[in-house]
Amino acid sequence: MRGSSPPGNGFTCDDGDVNPAEIPTASVSDLPSQDLVLLDVREPDEWAAGHAPEAVHIPLGDLPARAGELADLPDDRPVYVVCRSGGRSARAAAWLNAAGLADAINVAGGMKSWHTEGRAIVGDHEGVPPEVL
């Protein structure tokens, strides 16, 4: 169903009626080591400081307007959604699932856990070591 239009009823990623218990969640250690589809919903400065090498970047606030870009992602596996620590990605995963745009799973602990688990991160600033903001 990826690529269909998001709901036009005023639903946004900021809706406060998200029940965390209803959001599929996985820890970093549970993520597949190959063919991972990772969506990073952090802000541009956070992304530039350090991100997973193969991640797709769409900031949370831009997600409704850029949802069409999800059609470019493989639709035969889940989209794991990550932010710094898991709050924004939980909202994004809930929205993506409710809109029928992806089989989205929140990454518990976000990029902080990603880095703690020893997963690779890259930054966009030459000569500056990547970090998780």
Image (tube, rainbow, N blue to C red):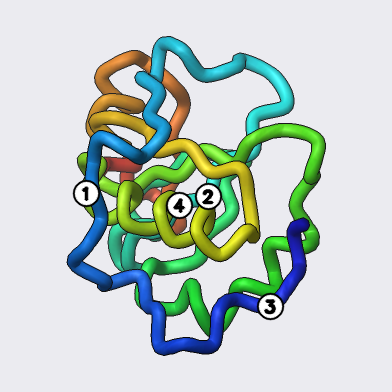
Residue 24 on image: x %, y %: 42, 33
**Disc 4 from disc 3: Cα separation:** 20 Å
Q: Residue 87's mark?
A: 1
Disc 2 and disc 4 in contact, CB within 8 angstroms? yes
- Taking the spot 45% from the left edge, 52% from the top edge, the residue there is 40
Residue 125 in view: no
User: Would you identify the image quadrant in which residue 46 lies?
Assistant: bottom left
**Disc 1 from disc 2: Cα separation:** 14 Å
- Taking the spot 43% from the left edge, 35% from the top edge, the residue there is 121
Examine the rendered structure and indicate whether residue 37 appears above or below residue 15: above
Q: Helix, strand, or loop for circle 3? A: loop
**Disc 4 from disc 1: Cα separation:** 12 Å
Residue 126 on image: x %, y %: 44, 54
Say whether residue 90 is left or right of residue 87: right
Please identify, in this view, whether the residue under mark 1 or under mark 2 is nearer the observer: 1
The amino acid type of the residue labelled 3 equals: Ser
Disc 1 and disc 2 in contact, CB within 8 angstroms? no
- Which residue carries the number 3 mark? 5
Please identify, in this view, whether the residue under mark 3 or under mark 2 is nearer the observer: 3
What is the crowding at mark 4: few (fewer than 14 residues within 10 Å), some, or many (at least 20)?
many
